[in-house]
Image (cartoon, grey):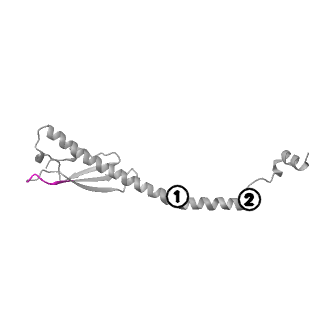
Amino acid sequence: MNIENHDRKANPLLDNAGFTLLEIIAVLVIMSILAVVAVPKYFDLQDQARQKAMGTGIAEAVGRVNGYFAQQVLANIAPNTIDYLSTELGTDLGDFFLTVTGTGAPAGGTGDITLTVTGRADTPVATLTTVQTVPRPGL
């Protein structure tokens, strides 16, 4: 039996197995390179997610305008007399608020509806605001 192996088993402090300084530095360099590449990508993904959320908010607002138009037409209200009010369409879009302007029926029966979608203050989309102008449905 080899005495050297016997001493290592009896006293684990004599075991020299471990990482060298060169191996540790190599791992740190690799992790640094990954961090430099991954961190900007992560922030870019966050920005993309916020923009997609804003697009979803606008789509919800347009859907509400179209849904309200359909309700009013089914109630036999003439399309050129429909007023698209925030009280009728609602202002709560989850993480966003909806503001509607240009809602009055113009004299000629034409016009646009301006939808402003703003992020709530307590959400990750708080700094975002988008304005979308859509034609009045049915005209």
- Where in the figure is residue 84, as x and y percent of width and height? 18, 47
- Left or right, 132 with respect to 51, comes to left
- Where in the figure is residue 20, as x and y percent of width and height? 74, 59
- Where in the figure is residue 125, as x and y percent of width and height? 38, 53
Which one is nearer the viewer's eye here, 85 or 66?
Answer: 66
The residue singled out by tag 1 in the image is 38
Q: Residue at x 29, y 51 (%)?
A: 58
Label 2 amino acid?
A: Thr
Check residue 112 for magenta coloring: yes
Element under disc 2: loop
Element under disc 1: helix
- Left or right, 25 with respect to 35, comes to right
- Where in the figure is residue 65, as x and y percent of width and height? 22, 46
Q: Residue at x 34, y 52 (%)?
A: 54
Hey, which residue is sitting farthest left in the picture?
Answer: 107
Label 1 amino acid?
A: Ala
Residue 44 position by quadrant:
bottom left
The numbered disc on residue 138 is none
Count neighbours of disc 1 (C-alpha within 10 A) and say few if under 14, some if 14 to 19, many if 20 or more: few
Q: CA distance from mark 2 to mark 1?
A: 27 Å
- Left or right, 68 with respect to 80, comes to right
Q: Residue at x 85, y 45 (%)?
A: 10
Rendered-image quadrant of the N terminus: top right
The boundaries of the magenta stretch are: 108-113
The residue singled out by tag 2 in the image is 20
